[in-house]
Image (cartoon, rainbow, N blue to C red):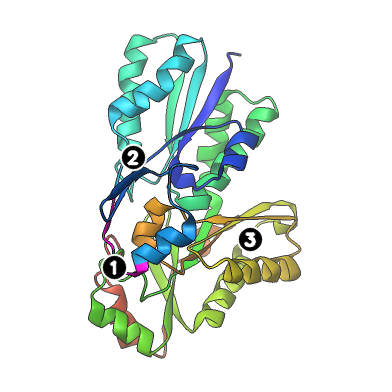
Amino acid sequence: MRDYIIATDSCCDFDENLIRELDLTVIPLSVHLGQDHFRNYPGEMPESHVFYTRLSKGEPAQTSAPNVEAFKDAFRPFLEAGKDVLYLGFSSALSATYQNAAMAVEELREAFPDAVIRAVDTLCASMGQGLLVDLAVQEKRKGKSLEEVVIRLSGTTIPHLCHWFTVGISASCAGWRLSAGKAIVGNLLNIKPVLHVDHEGRLVPMESAKGRKKSVEALVRHMEETAIAPETQRIYISHGDCLGDAEVLAAAIQSKLGVASVTIGDVGPVIGAHAGLGTLALFFPGKREIIVTPKKSLHRKAVQAIFVGFQGIPDYRE
């Protein structure tokens, strides 16, 4: 079996320690914030609090995917050294990142016909993508081949990876393509949307919660209802400059579900530019197929007004 490397992109939201621990190759996306441009990579981007403060003050943020040449430049040295490449990419439903990587893989296969080069669409974002990458690394360390890892990920892991999150309406007004009026309605009623990522990697609003405490409780409830063997799993939580809420969430799932390990990290600038200040996300292996119907709310019309206009998210209507 030829040796291979596992690569991903910076939307996994891993810090330097996790990148080093898992021996990953990470291809960064880019961010324009106000007049500044930087790569979404540890050591090259602003501190999380600084980024979200600037974002919440209204500085415009734009994100861009690595182009085909960036992926080819990242993969080629390993192929020249006789190694194969497995790339696990940011959801194709949310970015052109995976498509660019897939094109790079096709071009590199012509130059390296004896190599195995695979690009896998994780259908994930943030530390949900990171959790999938972590699981792939653990399979590799058990001695599994590249193709065996791909079969495991595609067959059982990706279909059962759950992503639940809530956002802070006021801070994410610009990032979610949400009008100021709709944000005001949400703020006045203290409504916090609760969303998940569906089997096609799309963001889907499922319910609303009255206040932050209730939205955190909703995340815990969904994990209680769908988690698979949580006491044996490594769970990931990411947050948009709301560490206190992330710690409350971690304590709750450890207390209720006996989770063995919880890793907390920042929602990086690329995801944060669209999700905004106050985003809180929970990622775990679970029974995603049973999640089918958005729940009604006492403030249904207001929730409709908030959800309509989210880029890439369907209207919240019966």
Sequence-earlier tag: 3 or 2: 2
Please identify the quarter of the rendering in which residue 147 is found.
Answer: top right
Q: Which residue is mark 2?
A: 97
Describe the element under mark 3 as helix, strand or loop: loop
Q: Which residues are magenta?
A: 56-62
* Mark 1 crowd level (few <14, some 14–19, many ≥20, 10 Å Cα): some
**Callout 3 amino acid:** Ala
Q: Which residue is mark 1?
A: 58
Residue 245 is left or right of residue 273, and the answer is right
Q: Is residue 295 visible?
A: no
> Are the residues at dot 3 and dot 2 in contact (C-beta closer than 8 Å)?
no
Q: Is residue 191 above or below residue 109?
A: below
> Are the residues at dot 2 and dot 1 in contact (C-beta closer than 8 Å)?
no
**Callout 1 amino acid:** Gly
Residue 290 x %, y %: 52, 63
Sequence-earlier tag: 3 or 1: 1
Residue occupying the point 60% across, 23% down: 145
Q: Which residue is mark 3?
A: 227
Please identify the quarter of the rendering in which residue 245 is found.
Answer: bottom right
Q: CA distance from mark 2 to mark 1?
A: 26 Å
**Callout 2 amino acid:** Thr
Front residue of 77/219: it is 77
Residue 125 x %, y %: 44, 51
State the quadrant of the C terminus.
bottom left
Residue occupying the point 53% across, 57% down: 162
